[in-house]
Image (cartoon, rainbow, N blue to C red):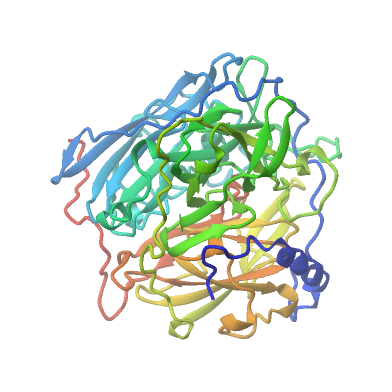
Amino acid sequence: MRDQIGAPGTGIARREYLLATGAASVSALAGCSVPTAEKEPATTIADHSSPELEKWVDEVPRPGVIEPSGTKNGQPRYEVDIREVEQQIHRDLPPTTVWGYDGQYPGPTIEAEQGEPIYVRWRNELPDDHLLPEDPTVHGDLIPYDTAGVRTVTHLHGGNVEAESDGKARAWFTRDFRETGPEFEKKDYYYANDQPPTTLWYHDHSLGITRLNVYAGLAGFYLLRNEHERGLDLPEGEYEIPLVFQDRSFDEDGSLFYPTAVSDGKGDGSHPEPSIVPQFYGDTSVVNGKAWPRLSVEPRTYRLLLLNGANSRYYNLKLLEYDEDSGETGDDGPPFVQIGNDGGLLSEPVRIADRLELGSSQRADVVVDFADYAGQTLLLHNDALSLYRGPPEKSTETQPLPELMLVDVDDAGGVRDTGQVPDELTTVPEIPVDSADRHRHLTLATQTDEYGRRLYLLGTDEEKSGYRLDDPITEDPTLGDTEIWSLANYTGMSHPIHLHLVHFQMLGRQPVSDYDPTEDGVEPETLESPEPYELGWNDVINVDPAEVVHVIVHFGEYDGLFTDQTGDYMWHCHMIEHEDHDMMRPFRVLPDADDGDTDDTDAGDTDDDG
């Protein structure tokens, strides 16, 4: 039974139960050779503290909306320059050098209409040298680190797009397309927008340096609309606010700080310098490109489009009453009423009674009613530990970034808008479990690389300890097939797992101690039900340690939604340090042998330079 308004919250006790019952019995799985769920190192990044900044002095900016620069094949065509700029991230910091789409961080919002395609040319205008130190040992055999220029490629996260426009990691290109990666195919990306309206986002996806490019600022919103959504009478215009949450660290001169060495206590010089780090957790909250900001609202309903754009950090969000003079929190503030997530609107609104969880790259479309809080200040609070659901060591790295943003509710008089969210939002067709053509048993595992650094990998029931990125493809669904993917986490921390191209539905989760990877098929009634924020269509799902998450995915058009596409795509952990090294795998959607190649690519696009 799906939770409706008034339903219980996030169910933390359930996760604690899984950890208690599952971690102790990982090794008991028949034929399982992967490491058991293990402790993460207490300190994994260089010791650094950002300059002390006065909080709550800057207003949250709202990303601008970019307009098309022309047309192509009768459709809008955008040109978005990727440039280095200086931006004031905090009033008391010197301007920070960042990279921005269209010269701004975060990038401008693209607003598109369902069923109306667009073209985008992402133009690399970056300097020859990277803003941050690169580690050439990461995929050193696949990346020409001696190539002049910075490599970029843009992925429309959540986009149901042709393979040529997916923004795969090896489809990179340098300034003016002088050098291109082995999977580069076209300059103008084609987005069909033939999927439910939702909050998508675009970000860099270049192999081996995604973590650096996104950290430098390469991300932005992509909002897909339709008439049905507009007819729901949800807050709009100035009362709809996209918010991207990130964490950053700074040097005294305002420059971005990113660690370049693994700090694991060895001190023996065995790690490269600079070196990739296992995870990154900044000590400064940044919202829409401003550090420690405040948001001014009226005492009425707002629609907030929330995005976790952090490299590694989880967020577990709640609004609390706040006394700015004392810095103390009080009672709960207004609840989030979630109306959508990664893939669009939920079938019905869900009142989040406790906290809203967002793993890296997850989105939540929420409505908040501030009417009862006129004249008050609220704190957007986060209680997620950095090493999420991992060991609770008392170290600085495992502490949350609790204070994200203040919300000032105006003490306005007159009539206050307290619009109601409709009881029914849309129809989300259920994918029946008995329609599955195949059940894949997949693993999240950990090893060490040749330098002794922690290495997270994705595997199968045949290779539970995991594969590297360039190993042969093991996931090759056929167009039109429905599959169950069971993701078993044998590591000591949570991972947000993302599939390109497709959206899937969550069936449920269970402890690894109850999971038999030799059995195909699942019975949802025997599983722990999805959380309220996991309903509907997802493109990211969180998998906790010692836990198995089961999802069902259809490859191709389903009940009038999405499109038929074939070709090569990616699936990976969206903790960006993990996907860079080496928790990312390709998958291939094969054409149906009976129908031929029926993908919905833009056959008329010759991708000339005109």
- Which image quadrant is residue 515 in? bottom right
Tell me where residue 428 appears, x and y as whole percent: 39, 69
Above or below residue 526? Residue 400 is: above
Relative to residue 229, is residue 576 drawn left or right? right
Asked if residue 35 shows in the view, the reply is no
The residue shown at (35%, 43%) is 236
- In this view, the residue in front, 482 or 59, is 59
Relative to residue 352, is residue 445 drawn left or right? right
Relative to residue 507, is residue 592 drawn left or right? left
Asked if residue 82 shows in the view, the reply is yes
- Which image quadrant is residue 584 in? bottom right
- Which image quadrant is residue 266 in? top right
Above or below residue 137? Residue 344 is: below
Tell me where residue 567 appears, x and y as whole percent: 36, 62
- In this view, the residue in front, 246 or 12, is 12
Relative to residue 384, is residue 106 drawn left or right? left
The residue shown at (47%, 27%) is 99
Report the quarter where the C terminus lies.
Answer: top left
Tell me where residue 25 appears, x and y as whole percent: 81, 74
Above or below residue 274? Residue 483 is: below
Residue located farthest toward the front when viewing the structure as drawn: 414
- In this view, the residue in front, 257 or 445, is 257
Tell me where residue 432 appears, x and y as whole percent: 44, 81
